[in-house]
Amino acid sequence: DSTAETRAHYLFASNGINAEQIKHALAEVDIRPGFDIQLGLDVHSDNLEMFLQSHRDENILSAIQDNIRQSTHRFDQSVAQSLSIDWDAQLQAIFRQFGLIPPSADSASVNEEMNVTSSGASSSPIANRQPWSSSFSDHTKQKLIKKSDSSLTPKNQAWSKPSIGRLALGYSMNATAYSQPLVLELNASRLNNTDYPLAHRISETIRSIGTDQKSLQISEAWQIFYTMITHALSDSDADGARGTPECRRFAKIYANPKDNSVQIASLRSSLVAGALHYLEKQFFALIESQIAKQRAQAQLGGLPKPINKIKAYVNILFKRGDMWVVPHLEIINDIPIWAIIFYLLRSGMITEAMELTLENEFAFQKTDRSFPSYMKAYATSSDRRLPRVLNERLRSEFKQNLRFYKEGTSDPYKYAVYKLVGRADLSNKNIPDVLPTAEDWIWSHLMLTREVSHNTGMSMEEPLHEQYSLTDLQTTLLQFGARHFSANGQNNGLYLHLLLLTGQFERAAYYAHQQYPDDGVHFSIASYYYGLLRVSGIEQLSSEDILTLTPEDLPQISFARLMGLYTQDFRIEDPEMAVDYISLICLGGDVWPEQQNIAHEAIRELVLDTRAFAALLGDVQASGIRDPGILERKMKLFNIDDEEQFLLTITEQAATRTDEEGRYSDAILLYHLSEDYDSVVSLLNRLLGDLLASSELRSGSLIGGANGYGEPGHDMQLPMSIAASVNPGTLARDIMDLYETNKEIMSAVQAHTRDTCNMLLKIVSARENFEAGKYTQCIADMDSANLVPMLPMSGIVTRSGGGNGAINLVRKRAQQFGSLNEAITRNIPMILRMCMEALIEIKNAVSDTEFGKDPTRHKVIAEVQERAKNCMIYAGMIQYRMPQESYSYLTKLENAI
């Protein structure tokens, strides 16, 4: 009723609803039967065909919408992933690739690689990597440079591409600029059989590379290496090796060391002496720097002799005015005598320390009356060993008076001097309070080491627990690991210096390759040159790591794979430089002959990868004069003595490889350069046969498009200086013209091979004329090829002088079919079809002439028909050697004639 309706209006209005408006909207709704506006189809129609059609269209539209919806969803996911990228990490990776920051290595991985096991240096996942990217043999390619250790690359760098740039590996173009010329000079000296002062040249060059922390650390590392090598070389000269070439001087001793060998003990002692010399000179330079900065406090008086500088340095440390401010220093004659003696020893001035001791001998009588005799014996001993009696007395005094040293109770320098001079109590090698830096620590341990040789009985002079050699120090250093010396990765060069100072050249090169990749490579080269690097053999090349261990637990470097990684990006643009680096692998041939085989395999791969055959292998002029290539000029670097062996080792094997892989154009040139001319022509025959068989008649091109042949899926490239053409037919003509001008070359080609090539060239010429519409010339070319017997009977004369020899000639050619080269026989169906179609075109051209009564016209048609008949007789005799459809098609063509 109206009352209820009024109340409803008020109820709706109180809630913001206009009831009247809703009423009018409902009244306007059309509730008549449905009608499909899109298709114009009445939903209730009885037309079944239209109903099914509408449902089909709806299904198609629904499928399209689903695909659009899925694509949109995938796109949204991709955008979301892109937006969630850690841009800071990406920025750091870019900086690292461009050398703006040094590649940082995870400390844990550093410790793992330095405590390497026999199975490899790291268990981190490795991604596939093949620097020799062409076609290394399966036997060696995966071994030579199988994978790249993930610890050698920036963190999170995945090897997802077959070729990674130098910046991604951490190699610097700036470092290459100074290092590569030195390698060229080194190899030039090797070619001239002269020594090259590699360590000295690198040491000189490295000083100019920069003043940043990284450059200074690298420069210092090379200075350490140079100093140690210089001492080792000079000591070996003193031991009777004078005149021995520096190259590989220590290879045989270092490669397989025996702990009881006099030679290896002498070498280690020389290396220790070099390390001590460097540390002592470095420390004295620091003293001079401090004195220059604090002249007033140093109070350097008198002549600037070394001992006076040491006293001045002690003044800086301990004297303020006229007072010695550090307690417990023993003052003798107004100087802290033990501190000065210690710093004289620390600066390598042992003679000066002895002289100072003897000058104050009277003062020592009160407390250390025997010390002057200890110091004199120590300074005058060639190997810094005290005589047994004095040594036992010193150690006895040390145990009684100094063994239980406590900080702040006695002079720490006295404890240190007794410890170093007498090598006392080696069960506790720690020297407290006086060794504030890592350089001081390694110096003290080097001072305590002594090499023993069971052959000379030196080991019997000391009990086992008092023996401490360089090998023991190396073990101690590895137990600390890189993390101990490089807090937060801020001083990575320090651990490299310590590895070098302890004679661990393999681990030093490996660690340097992690932190400074270019210098790591060249540290390996320099060590290898002097014979101070063990390299892995072919059986270890399958390892995933550059650093591995020998069965005797000695470290070794995969030098060949390291050279492959370093040269992978510039070997194409600069193959000569790549040859120089790869040739260094052969340096180890004096100890490991298999290194030469590895180098030869790497060179073969370089030849195949760069395809710079003329540059690498040379060329042969039309006159037969050979222009030597890069490899031939540098033959001596690979221990190849004569050209014949060189060609056999490199060129012929590379040619065989390319031949087996179907790279015919490359194989032709390689066989040509190796002077295997018969193989060149044989390959030309195969190539021409393939080309003729693979292109259809009337295709407009003999070659069959732009894809080429011999290398499936690639554009054909023929980088030959003798015929720079993309047409194999032209290439074959050029080569045969070249060979025919030289009798010696032609004599090396078998007659059957030569005849086959000439016949194929005539067939190619016939095909070219056929494609060009020159049908008469096509038939003439086939007549000159002497393959298909098409000549009319009037043109064939028998022995009796008659003209009935056509059948005999056809039969003879059919009998010769089996002796033809496969490159020809496989093309016989095409050749017969070409001849028949050419004859048809000639007949049609003559039939269409306006001179219907011309007697020549009938003669030509008759000759064409006779030629076609002979052709079909020949085809009939060999029809079972052809596909069935070929003979059927020829029969149709005959009917057309």
Image (spheres, helix red, strand yellow):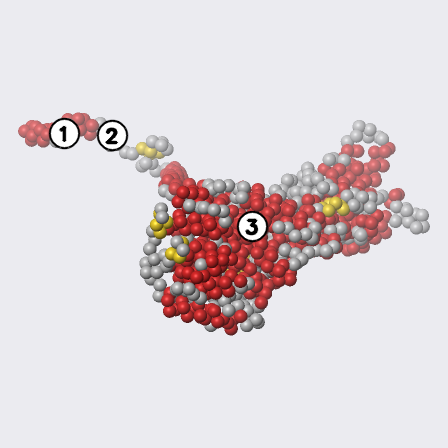
| Name of the residue lying farthest toward the left | 3
Q: Position of residue 846 (x, y in %)?
A: 79, 33
Residue occupied by mark 2:
30
Give the CA separation, mark 2 to mark 3.
Answer: 90 Å
Residue occupied by mark 3:
522
* Residue 368 seen: yes
- The answer to whether residue 115 is left or right of residue 325 is right
- The answer to whether residue 163 is left or right of residue 52 is right
Residue displayed at 34% across by 57% down: 328
Amino acid type at mark 2: Asp
| Name of the residue lying farthest toward the right | 800
Label at residue 16:
1
Residue displayed at 59% across by 45% down: 180
Q: Quadrant of the N terminus?
A: top left
Tag nearer the camera, 1 or 3? 3
Instruction: Say which element carries label 1.
Output: loop
Give the CA separation, mark 1 to mark 2.
Answer: 27 Å
Tag nearer the camera, 1 or 2? 1
When the figure is inspected, residue 575 is found, relative to residue 855, above or below; the finding is: below
Q: Tag 3: Cα neighbours inside 10 Å, few (<14), some, or many (≥20)?
A: many
Q: Position of residue 645 (x, y in %)?
A: 73, 56
Give the CA separation, mark 1 to mark 3.
Answer: 87 Å
Q: Which comes sooner in the sequence, label 1 or label 2?
A: 1
Q: Position of residue 348 (x, y in %)?
A: 50, 55
Write down the quadrant of residue 441 in the picture. bottom left
Q: Tag 2: Cα neighbours inside 10 Å, few (<14), some, or many (≥20)?
A: few
